[in-house]
Image (spheres, grey):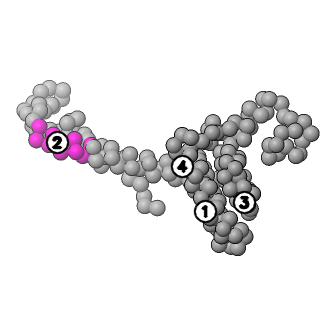
């Protein structure tokens, strides 16, 4: 029998198709920063509650920082046999700090990990999107100001009219970018 976390419950290996279905590391490897941040917070909570020693919490934190650095530099070997981000991080943490790594799962289920990691990922993605939207709005306003004095032909009923400053009409040179920037939503605080 393999050493998979659920291996003790079965007398035979699962079919290859089931092993392939259970592997999520190709997707959830993108949650590594959130998984590590949540694990560090969890270890700190366990130490604060006296559930693990402060020395264990410190070692866990240092090990997780090492893993974060390895992944960030592209030097982390994600293993499909370990199925997901949680098992990949836990396995490497165990290699780095030994048995203390196993204490990280005290008072936390894998469902807790998945839900927390996903929430943190969504929050971080919203923050990134919000920053990109703000930059886009600023670019639109900048473009509008650059062309505020640009003169172009006015139109009335699809016929050319007198020349007017582009800021007066809905032109792509000034008013449209400013109006678009104003119409874009801004994120509520919190």
| Residue occupying image coordinates x 51% and y 43% | 73
Crowding near the residue tagged with mark 4, few <14, some 14–19, many ≥20 C-alpha atoms within 10 Å: some
Of the numbered discs 4 and 2, the one sitting upstream in the chain is 4
Locate residue 166, reporting x and y percent: 14, 38
Left or right placement of residue 172 versus residue 62 in this view:
left
Of the numbered discs 3 and 4, the one sitting upstream in the chain is 4
**Residues at marks 2 and 3, CA–CA distance in whole angstroms:** 60 Å
Local SS, label 3: helix
Residue named by callout 3: 100
Of the numbered discs 1 and 4, the one sitting upstream in the chain is 1
Left or right placement of residue 48 versus residue 150 in this view:
right
Locate residue 140, reporting x and y percent: 27, 43
| Residue occupying image coordinates x 15% and y 31% | 156
Left or right placement of residue 185 versus residue 54 in this view:
left
Look at discs 4 and 2 and give the one toward the viewer.
Answer: 4
Do the numbered discs 1 and 4 sit on residues whose CB atoms are within 8 Å? no
* Residue 69, disc: 4
Which residue occupies the foreground of this view, 46 or 169?
46
Give above or below for 55 relative to 20: below
Look at discs 1 and 2 and give the one toward the viewer.
Answer: 1
Crowding near the residue tagged with mark 1, few <14, some 14–19, many ≥20 C-alpha atoms within 10 Å: some
């Amino acid at each position: 029998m393999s050493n998979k976390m659920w291996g003790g419950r079965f007398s035979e290996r699962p079919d290859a198709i089931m092993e392939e279905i259970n592997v999520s590391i190709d997707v959830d490897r993108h949650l590594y920063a959130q998984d590590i941040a949540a694990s560090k917070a969890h270890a700190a909570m366990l130490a604060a509650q006296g559930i693990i020693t402060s020395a264990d919490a410190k070692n866990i934190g240092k090990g997780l920082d090492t893993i974060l650095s390895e992944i960030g530099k592209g030097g982390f070997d994600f293993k499909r046999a370990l199925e997901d981000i949680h098992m990949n991080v836990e396995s490497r943490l165990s290699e780095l700090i030994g048995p203390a790594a196993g204490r990280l799962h005290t008072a936390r289920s894998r469902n807790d990990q998945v839900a927390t990691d996903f929430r943190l990922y969504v929050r971080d993605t919203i923050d990134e999107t919000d920053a990109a939207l703000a930059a886009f709005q600023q670019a639109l306003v900048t473009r509008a100001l650059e062309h505020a004095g640009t003169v172009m032909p006015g139109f009335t009923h699809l016929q050319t009219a007198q020349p007017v400053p582009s800021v007066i009409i809905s032109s792509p040179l000034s008013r449209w970018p400013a109006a678009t920037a104003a119409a874009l939503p801004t994120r509520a605080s919190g």
